[in-house]
Amino acid sequence: MINAIRQELASAEPENARSMLRKNWLRLIIESHTSDLEQLCLTHPQSNDPDLLLIRACCRDLAGDSYGAGYLRGQGLRTAPDDFVACFTELLLAPDASTKAAVADRAHVALAQCGPDDDYSSALFLLGWTEVRLRRDFPRAIGLLRSAAEEARMRSHMETYRLAQSNLVFALTQAGQFTEAEQILDTLPSAPRSTDWDQFEGGLPKANRGCIAYWRGDFEEAITLFESLINEASSGNNFEAQARLYYVMSLIALKRETRYDAAANLLEGISKTDKHGIPWDTLRRVVAAWLAHAEGQDERARALAAPTLARTGASVAHALLAELYRLLGEPEMSSQAFRLAAAAGMPRYARVSTLVTSAAMHSLAGRGTKAHEQLERALENAAAERILAPFLGNDPVINDLLTAHATWGPNDPDFLRSILEKQGLHSAVVTGILTERERGVLVCLRTTMTAEEIAVHLGIAYPTVKSHIRSIYRKLHVTTRRDAVRAFARNSR
């Protein structure tokens, strides 16, 4: 296509070249032919044509030149008609979420009115890409990206197809549909080369696997995946920045205190302004507040978090913030964060997080029945995708609720048992108190199983179980089963 446009430019009919540029610019940008595309726009005899200026603005943005992109965008919009090129340029370049959402609404209309000179499959992809980042309607974003992938496949635009599939995985991951996301990831072809579009993607396949690992409580795996993505020279406003955020939360989950200083530096490198509709400063502040709390600096945590209560559109961040404010003993602030999380479309894992926090707050307020109802809702939402992270905070209130819930009567006792097992294993990684076999026995002690039943469940002799129980009591300085469970929860904080 690039060569065909060059040939038209060399002919006596440059208008044909302009028509070809207008028809193919979006695909060429998505498939990262930006430097060639911009050179063609500059070579055209009418290089000040508003469409060509807008196309150049998109090329400059992908090249990392936000100032040049802004100037060219302003020049083009002064005289450009309100058409397909103007709409989808704005869709790509709009920085803040509210502006991007308004342009996306226009783009849905423009998509339905695509003409023969408009690139429908690339427009589908860009609109789906945008809707994922706005996080306002995950089913719609997923539908757009499925359609974009199919259109690109039928037109043999295989790089657009790969990008649509990759972003479909991202949409599914962000929505909490981890199983389907992993199925597509397992068949997703690798990028043939490093591209300009990579700065928007942020290593999506590994980033998606890392995100899934985090929410499933596999924090060690998440750290390994994110470490391979982090680049401290990054601009801090793409999905490498998201890798930083989840990396730091994984360090906090495992209490890797020796890495906290480096983690703080990584957070400082994240943008303090929005980019492509992502509220990076809100996300950065919430994770930085969690890090301050982990370091025992609760006043600093409050100061960092306070501005985020004035912004919407970051449901996951506000779900995490609700739990942080609960731990800080600020129930009113926690409730405010709840409302902000609910104002945006909450993905499944954010919903689980808020339900666990709600259960803990009801428990602290002495509303035991309501606490168990909320915990049961959290378990029901978490089970299908095995979302475990919200249950693994090593907080005594949540630990006691989980233990008591086994007696209360969960609808899915096997899933609850798997959480208790994971929680015990995770706690042992953090504290290093018990042996592997003792951890297995302690997990069973948190259920209603008798010592005889524990022996059968673990496939060991009854006297061995009794010996492990005595060792657990000795290490935790307790004399009863209930006190052992509570002491381990306290020691795991």
Image (cartoon, rainbow, N blue to C red):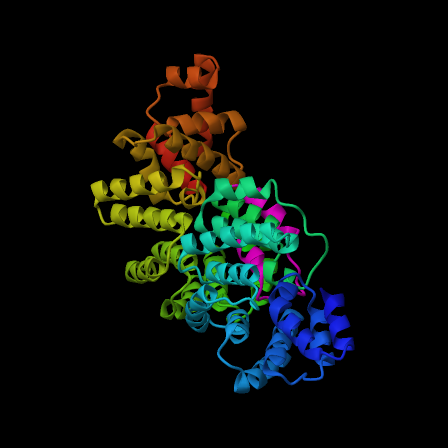
Above or below 440: residue 99: below
Above or below 207: residue 475: above
- Locate residue 144 relative to residue 156 in the image: left or right: left
Place of residue 112 in the rendered image (x, y in percent of width and height, measured from the top left): 44, 64
Visible residue check, residue 473 = no
Count of all numbered marks drawn on residues in the image: 0
| Residue 63, quarter of the rendered image | bottom right
Q: Nearer the viewer, residue 316 or 345?
A: 345
Identify the residue at image location x=40%, y=70%: 307
- Residue extent of the magenta highlight: 218-246
Question: Is residue 225 located in the magenta-colored stretch of the structure?
Answer: yes
Above or below 104: residue 51: below
Question: Is residue 423 located in the magenta-colored stretch of the structure?
Answer: no
Q: Nearer the viewer, residue 433 or 207?
A: 207
Q: Quick one: which residue is furthest to the front in this view?
A: 12
Place of residue 268 in the rendered image (x, y in percent of width and height, measured from the top left): 57, 67
Visible residue check, residue 24 = yes
Place of residue 231 in the rendered image (x, y in percent of width and height, measured from the top left): 66, 60
Q: Nearer the viewer, residue 79 or 194?
A: 79
Quadrant into which the C terminus falls: top left
Identify the residue at image location x=43%, y=13%: 462
Above or below 146: residue 196: below
Identify the residue at image location x=61%, y=41%: 187
Identify the residue at image location x=33%, y=44%: 397
- Locate residue 414 relative to residue 468 in the image: left or right: left
Quadrant into which the N terminus falls: bottom right
